[in-house]
Image (tube, rainbow, N blue to C red):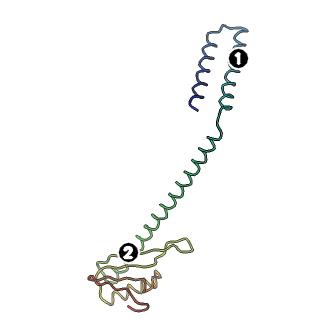
Amino acid sequence: MQNTLRELVMVSICCGAAMTLCPEGGIRQVLKLLCTAVLILSVLTAIKGFDFSVYALEQAKLTQTERELNENGKQAEARLNRRIVESQYNSYISERAMACGIQELRVEVETQWNLDGLWVPFGVTLTGHWDEGQRRLVQEILRDELGIPWERQTWISDGQYEKNAAGAG
């Protein structure tokens, strides 16, 4: 393609120089027609020599690359969206736990994609210090407000790992 462009530029320069040097009159009119014909032939030769199979192959490669980039972008967006939603749930749970009297709490929410196309809380791990009353309040908030059943709540206090049994505290 670069060679074709280079040839077209050179032909144009030669025609321009010839037109500049040619005296006014009938010869100049013939030269104009000749230059026009030469430029049209240069363009047609470039089109005739154009390899459409290479062009089609390159176009297919570009289309495939575009699809891959779009897919990667969508996956990155979904991961980022999930992290943002998890962070928001973590903050919400921390604020609600603080309102129940639990001061230092580390929250890790696990989300899951639902059929409505949203990230919803699936499970939670809470690490910190609390008394049994505070724990019961937060357990109920997690179950009633966020839909995280007791069996998917993990509580870790003073290195003690406690996985709730169904319906138990």
- Amino acid type, residue under disc 2 in the picture: Glu
The residue carrying mark 1 is 34
Residue 155, placed above or below residue 42: below
- Determine whether the residue tagged by mark 2 lies in a helix, strand or loop: strand
Asked if labels 2 and 1 touch by Cβ distance under 8 angstroms, the answer is no
Q: Which residue is located at x 47 percent, y 65 percent?
A: 81
- Hey, which quadrant is residue 110 in on the image? bottom left
- Does 124 sit left or right of 113 as displayed? left
* Mark number, residue 108: 2
Question: Between tags 1 and 2, which lies in front?
Answer: 1
Q: Residues within 10 Å of mark 2 (few under 14, many from 20)?
A: some
- Does 152 sit left or right of 100 as displayed? right
- Hey, which quadrant is residue 11 in on the image? top right
Q: Which residue is located at x 52 percent, y 60 percent?
A: 74
Q: Which residue is located at x 69 percent, y 11 percent?
A: 28
- Viewer-closest of 55 and 141: 55
Quadrant of image for the N terminus:
top right
Q: Where in the figure is residue 25, as x and y percent of width and height?
A: 71, 8
| Residue positioned most to the left | 158
